[in-house]
Image (spheres, helix red, strand yellow):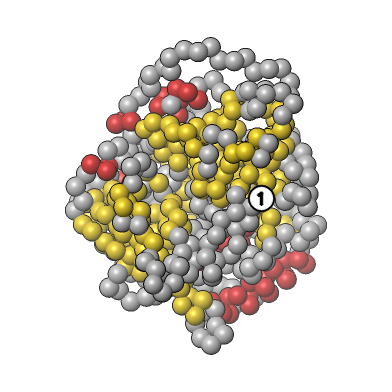
Amino acid sequence: MRSVSRCFLAILVCGVSFLSLEAQCPKRPAPGNVVDDALSLSSANGVLKKELTMKHSVDEFGYAHYCYIYQTGTGEVEAPTLRLNQGDQLLLDVKDRIDLDDSAGMMEMPASPKVCGDGGMMMLSSTNVHFHGLNVPPICHQDDVLTTLLQPGKPAFQFNIQIPKNEPPGLYWYHPHVHGFTEFQVNGGAAGALIVEGMEKFHPEVAGLTERVFVIRQQYLVPWVPGPYQLTINYQVAASPSFPSPIIKMKPNEKQFWRVANATIQDFMPLQVWFNGVPQKLQLIALDGYPLPKSRMVDTILVPPAGRAEFIVQAPPRDNEAIFIAQGYSTGPTGNPDLEQQLAKIQVSGDENEAPAIKAEPAPRASMNTIKFANLEKQKPTAQRKLYFSEEFGGTNGPIQFYITVDGQKQKVFEPNEKPVITTHVGAVEDWTVENHALETHAFHMHQIHFTVMEVDGKPVATKDLRDTIEIPFWEGPGHPYHSVKVRMDFRDPTIAGTFVFHCHILLHEDLGMMHKILVLPK
Ligand SMILES: [Cu+2]
């Protein structure tokens, strides 16, 4: 479907949704309150078996909510954190109960010819689940977003995922991924954290610390129309000074382990913690659910949309106030402004946190060599590829088309029934150089595997971080070089054989086709 008609339809659908006011989603916390973590659901005896129901409603301010509801003995909670160990099995029953009049038909797109789940047409009321960052098979009932489609009113669909024994411990997340409609549902808050336990085995410095899981989301009244938005932290609106700031409580000098997911639809967030206006050092432990071989002290952690950062924060002494803040970030002439926003006030009170006795840091109990992608940077690549992001106006006053293109191929937007633009095979290790030819920053995301960031703008990077999402800054225009990253892709693990996607994680761009398929053939 042409994007021009879909932009109009977006407005139409939002107009429609204002009319269905019966609240299906639980009430979200009011701003100015203490930020609570989501309910944690932990595996037992190697299994986590739970049910989530996706619903929809519109709040009193007109924001659409899409909610993953978990039923507890005392009521409904939204978007619980799923906690599993390496090797555990996740059995997640998901029911689509989105009550939305999108029978206009015009919103429908033909689904992929293959069917997993209920099949039918892809609509705003259809859903599925992507387990972002998990290195698991791209097949039906696991992490397959191309053919999995759940429809309202149908029986629950079961996701059945074995967390690999060598899965990197860290913060992952789950969210819907129906092409064309992902942005609406994630904008509505449909996103939750998934944690693979065991970080302390690799980073003993986090052992015993109070752990916080913060999911930052972003809500637009009409997500397809650029303009004002609100960030939220664990569903509490963070829009200070318009609203009172959310509150994070810490004890004086206390160290906490913060696990932060950027579940916004398009916000690049340079995260900082300030004491009296001064950015403080944060001890960075992991990025995108992958533990760093060695933690590092930084004052800013840039987290692109869909990225995660895990770090240790130390509170100031008693009666000091500190803030958790996302700095402003320029996404270029055709990008949306990502404005500075205080995410929370850190309120320091209570008993002094006992100063930790000075002792040698215990050695890690597990070697980095036991997790996936270890030493990937030392592997010899078997292929080199070049891809680029670009944008194009579709006509005199037409909308922008968003492309990601393999160099040498024709620019085209993603179609569900397209053929893969890249075919490789199990065993390959490839270096991909991804350039940005657009006047807007994009966020490159690869499904199914993490990649090593080898070079930025043609220069080797020392840290060689493992990521699943990486920002590529905008082109400054004629006379300037394109920004680029070179990433090392690891297709050696046979369990990820199959067809999956890579795309921009600005979700509007993905929905409009800045995405393509890759086929990894079994050996
Ligand atoms: Cu993009």
Q: Quadrant of residue 220?
A: bottom right
Percent x, y for residue 511?
51, 66
The answer to which of 50 and 201 lies nearer the viewer is 201
Residue occupying the point 45% across, 43% down: 288
100 or 305, nearer to the observer: 305
Left or right of residue 93: residue 317: right
Which quarter of the figure has residue 423?
bottom left
Is residue 351 depicted above or below 324 in this figure?
above
For residue 13, above or below residue 325: below
Indicate if the residue with disc 1 has its beta carbon within 8 Å of ligand 1: no
Res 505 visible? yes
Q: Note whether residue 53 is visible.
A: no
Disc 1 crowd rating (10 Å Cα; few below 14, some 14-19, many 20+) is: some
**Is residue 288 left or right of 489 when viewed as pictured?**
right
Compared with 302, 40 (above or below) is above
Picture coordinates of residue 189, whole percent (x, y): 64, 52
Q: Residue at x 40, y 65 (%)?
A: 436
Q: Residue at x 60, y 44 (%)?
A: 215
Q: Name which residue type carries label 1.
A: Gln
Query: Residue at the right extreme?
Result: 60
Q: Is residue 71 left or right of residue 297?
A: right
Residue 282 % position (x, y):
53, 34
Q: Secondary structure at mark 1?
A: strand
Left or right relative to 14: residue 327: left
The number of numbered badges drawn on the structure is 1
Residue beneath the point at 70% across and 48% down:
238
Residue nearest the viewer, comparing 329 with 450: 329
- Give the labeled residue for mark 1: 341
